[in-house]
Amino acid sequence: MLITFKCRAAPDVMMLENLAQYLVGIIGKRLGERGVITHDELPDAISKLESAITSDKQERAEHEGHFHEHEEGHEHHEIPVGLAQRAFPFLDMLRAAQKENADIVWGV
């Protein structure tokens, strides 16, 4: 199922429910049928998401040395897309909403 986040300060952001649930969880919210991130909550939400992205990048950097590219007996495998790439549109929306003192809503 797709979740659409709406805000007057930015274009709609659509994402799969499992990613939406993960990102909303990072900022301390629950993904219910409807929800809102008020403009008062945005500074804390942005900080939490940026911190999670930084942690993810550090973990990925540590694990990059563990990928055995081109070694005999090891098949090539893709490094999964990181949190920074997956969260960017949502983080962009949070920042735009903060600049405009706007709320972000989702729901039916």
Image (spheres, rainbow, N blue to C red):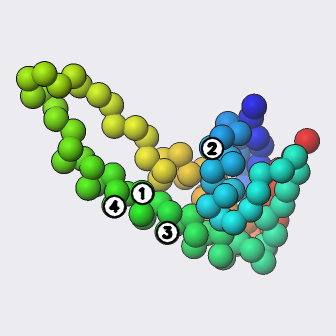
Say which mark, if any, is on residue 58: 4
Mark nearer the N terminus (4 vs 3): 3
The x, y position of residue 48, in whole percent, is: 58, 69
- Give SS at disc 4: helix
Marks 2 and 1, how far apart at CA: 15 Å
Circle 2 sits on which residue? 19
Question: Image point 28% across, 54% down: which residue?
Answer: 61
Q: In this rendered view, identify the residue nearer to me: 32 or 83.
A: 32
Circle 1 sits on which residue? 56
Amino acid under disc 2: Leu
Taking 8 as reference, is 48 above or below it?
A: below
Amino acid under disc 3: Ser
Are the two marked residues, 4 and 1, in contact with CB atoms closer than 8 angstroms?
A: yes
The x, y position of residue 1, in whole percent, is: 75, 31
Are the two marked residues, 2 and 4, in contact with CB atoms closer than 8 angstroms?
A: no
Q: Count neighbours of disc 4 (C-alpha within 10 A) and say few if under 14, some if 14 to 19, many if 20 or more.
A: few
Mark nearer the N terminus (2 vs 4): 2
Say which quarter of the image contains residue 92. bottom right
Amino acid under disc 4: Gln
- Give SS at disc 1: helix
Residue 54 appearing in the image: yes
Circle 3 sits on which residue? 51
Mark nearer the N terminus (2 vs 1): 2
Marks 2 and 4, how far apart at CA: 20 Å
Taking 101 as reference, is 81 above or below it?
A: above
- Give SS at disc 3: helix
Left or right: 22, with 80 as reference point: right
